[in-house]
Amino acid sequence: KAGVTQTPRYLIKTRGQQVTLSCSPISGHRSVSWYQQTPGQGLQFLFEYFSETQRNKGNFPGRFSGRQFSNSRSEMNVSTLELGDSALYLCASSSGTANTIYFGEGSWLTVV
Amino acid sequence: GIQVEQSPPDLILQEGANSTLRCNFSDSVNNLQWFHQNPWGQLINLFYIPSGTKQNGRLSATTVATERYSLLYISSSQTTDSGVYFCAVEPNGNDMRFGAGTRLTVKP
């Protein structure tokens, strides 16, 4: 059974640009959540989608958005990139609430 | 919001030694998981343990939900155990709150 797949793994963007990250969950999992990891702030929850609906949202500005498709694949978008958006972005999937969540390998974003 | 505190923040061991990592949380939770973050950044599931005790090889974990803490035990540590260990709790929904982690270094 394939794990959580994130693309791209590494990317470099310039301030002001936007970026889209993709996440394919484990087959059968309908919940996809996104996290940002930085040395200063640690691991922080961005948002969670279940059956194409955003169920939870963390404390991030509106520049961070996401969506989920009918096949449960999810994308997150960051617009007007800032240097502080440089981070490891992790996607996780689970079959539902209060179940084990599984993480992908992450997408390393560098903003220059 | 819920607070998650892990201790110690750093731990250095000699190969073969045992260790205990602690996670305290400030409110009741639906879910608690322990993860090991590998050098490439991926979070590897160790245990899903909202309550009770589980064992997997040299690793075991115990969560006492009524007292709001969880412990991760590593026995006979190996150099490959090095890395950062995270405790994460889910107060509601799939909104996992992570502790700051324990950085473990196992020396040969």
Image (cartoon, rainbow, N blue to C red):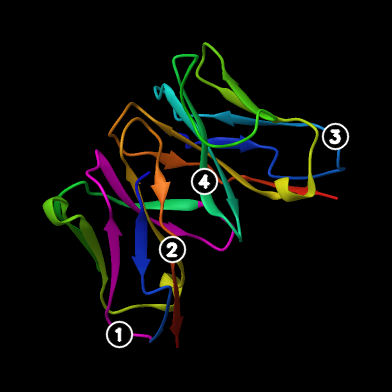
Crowd around label 3: few <14 · some 14–19 · many ≥20 (10 Å): few
Q: Chain of mark 2?
A: B
Cα separation between marks 1 and 4? 32 Å
Tell me which segment is drawn in magenta: B14-42
- Element under label 4? strand
Q: Chain of mark 4?
A: A
Q: Judge whether A66 appears above or below B105 on screen.
A: above
Q: Chain of mark 1?
A: B
Q: Is residue A37 left or right of residue A28?
A: right
- Element under label 1? loop
| Residue furthest out toward the front | B1
Crowd around label 2: few <14 · some 14–19 · many ≥20 (10 Å): many
Q: Nearer the viewer, mark 1 or mark 2?
A: 2
Q: Which residue is mark 3?
A: A17
Cα separation between marks 3 and 2? 32 Å
Percent across and percent down for residue A41 are: 57, 55
Q: Nearer the viewer, mark 1 or mark 4?
A: 4
Q: Judge whether B25 appears above or below A103 on screen.
A: below
Q: Is residue A62 magenta?
A: no
Q: Nearer the viewer, residue B45 or B34?
A: B34
Q: Which residue is mark 1?
A: B17
